[in-house]
């Protein structure tokens, strides 16, 4: 049986509940933003963060391998750009090939001879790697010309690459050594995200990022460097040094 004080408390609660005014529309509008954020909006923000983290982890997102994260970045490019902006980074968007990649903001990077960005490691390729990249890019462009820009799975048999690489690097002496050299180079380029591992039929897939890594500017720089090396080897100064060395011998 309820006591006297229990009845008084019950009456007070009922009175306060009945006399409490209902919030007006203006009061609802003035409520803090944190109280009006829905759970679905929080989930969207979480997806943006996850997509940005994936983009920073691998440096790229391909629609074929990560379609959900790819669509998140593609539909929220401004939000992801705001995440990358304090790092002097930006998004490169190649919607035709289904590719998103991280790039350095050139307008924020000091104009210096040496690579200066503290978070992006410059991909330094050897001469053999650079030649193979140029060959692979040529095949990728030919694939797109035949199948259409943005066509996926630009495959090429390893046997088709062997004679082309031999033209530039020479014959190592045996077919097994030549194949081993090519497989080693392909494995190194796989680490840069340019190709996949050979499948059961000894075919590789050239990934679309090769178009942006080996762009005409970079290929032109490679060509200029090769010409400089040839000029140095054929210059009179180099020939005179060679003759003097032969006389000493």
Image (spheres, rainbow, N blue to C red):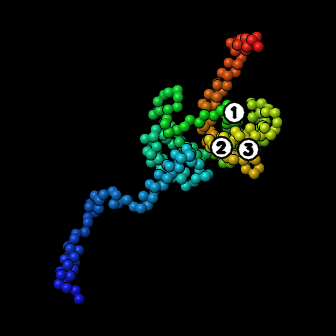
> Which residue lies at the image location 75% right of the left edge and 34% below the top edge?
165
Q: Which residue is mark 3?
A: 156
Tell me which label, 1 or 2, sits earlier in the chain.
1
Tell me which label, 3 or 1, sits earlier in the chain.
1
> Which residue lies at the image location 82% right of the left edge and 36% below the top edge?
174
Residue toward you, 249 or 35 = 249
What distance separates the C-alpha of mark 1 from that of mark 2? 14 Å
Disc 3 crowd rating (10 Å Cα; few below 14, some 14-19, many 20+) is some
Q: Which residue is mark 1?
A: 128
On screen, residue 204 above or below 40: above
Q: Quadrant of the C terminus?
A: top right
What distance separates the C-alpha of mark 2 from that of mark 3? 14 Å
Disc 2 on helix, strand or loop? helix
Mark 1 touches mark 2? (CB < 8 Å): no
Q: Which mark is residue 190?
A: 2
Q: Quadrant of the N terminus?
A: bottom left
The answer to whether 150 appears left or right of 13 in the picture is right
Q: Nearer the viewer, mark 2 or mark 3?
A: 2
Disc 2 crowd rating (10 Å Cα; few below 14, some 14-19, many 20+) is some
The answer to whether 199 appears left or right of 93 in the picture is right
Mark 3 touches mark 1? (CB < 8 Å): no
Residue 81 locus on image (x, y percent): 46, 44
Residue 20 locus on image (x, y percent): 22, 71
Q: Is residue 208 visible?
A: no
Q: Quadrant of residue 220?
A: top right
What distance separates the C-alpha of mark 3 from that of mark 1? 19 Å
């Amino acid at each position: 049986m309820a006591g006297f004080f229990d009845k008084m408390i019950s009456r007070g609660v009922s009175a306060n509940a009945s006399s409490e005014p209902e919030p007006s529309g203006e009061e609802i509008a003035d409520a803090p933003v944190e109280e009006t954020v829905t759970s679905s909006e929080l989930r969207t923000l979480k997806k943006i963060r996850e997509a940005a983290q994936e983009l920073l982890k691998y440096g790229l997102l391909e629609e074929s391998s990560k379609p959900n994260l790819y669509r998140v970045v593609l539909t929220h490019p401004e939000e992801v750009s705001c995440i990358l902006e304090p790092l002097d980074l930006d998004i490169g968007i190649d919607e035709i090939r289904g590719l998103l990649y991280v790039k350095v903001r050139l307008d924020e990077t000091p104009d210096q001879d040496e690579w200066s960005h503290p978070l992006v490691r410059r991909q330094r390729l050897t001469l053999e790697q650079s030649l193979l990249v140029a060959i692979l890019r040529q095949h990728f462009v030919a694939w797109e010309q035949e199948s259409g820009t943005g066509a996926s799975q630009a495959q090429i048999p390893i046997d088709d690459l062997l004679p082309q690489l031999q033209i530039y690097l020479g014959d190592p002496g045996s077919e097994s050594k030549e194949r081993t050299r090519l497989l080693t180079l392909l494995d190194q380029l796989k680490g840069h995200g340019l190709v996949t591992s050979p499948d059961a039929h000894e075919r590789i897939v050239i990934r679309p990022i090769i178009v942006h890594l080996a762009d005409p500017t970079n290929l032109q720089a490679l060509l200029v460097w090769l010409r400089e090396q040839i000029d140095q080897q054929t210059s009179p100064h180099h020939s005179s040094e060679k003759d003097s060395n032969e006389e000493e011998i």
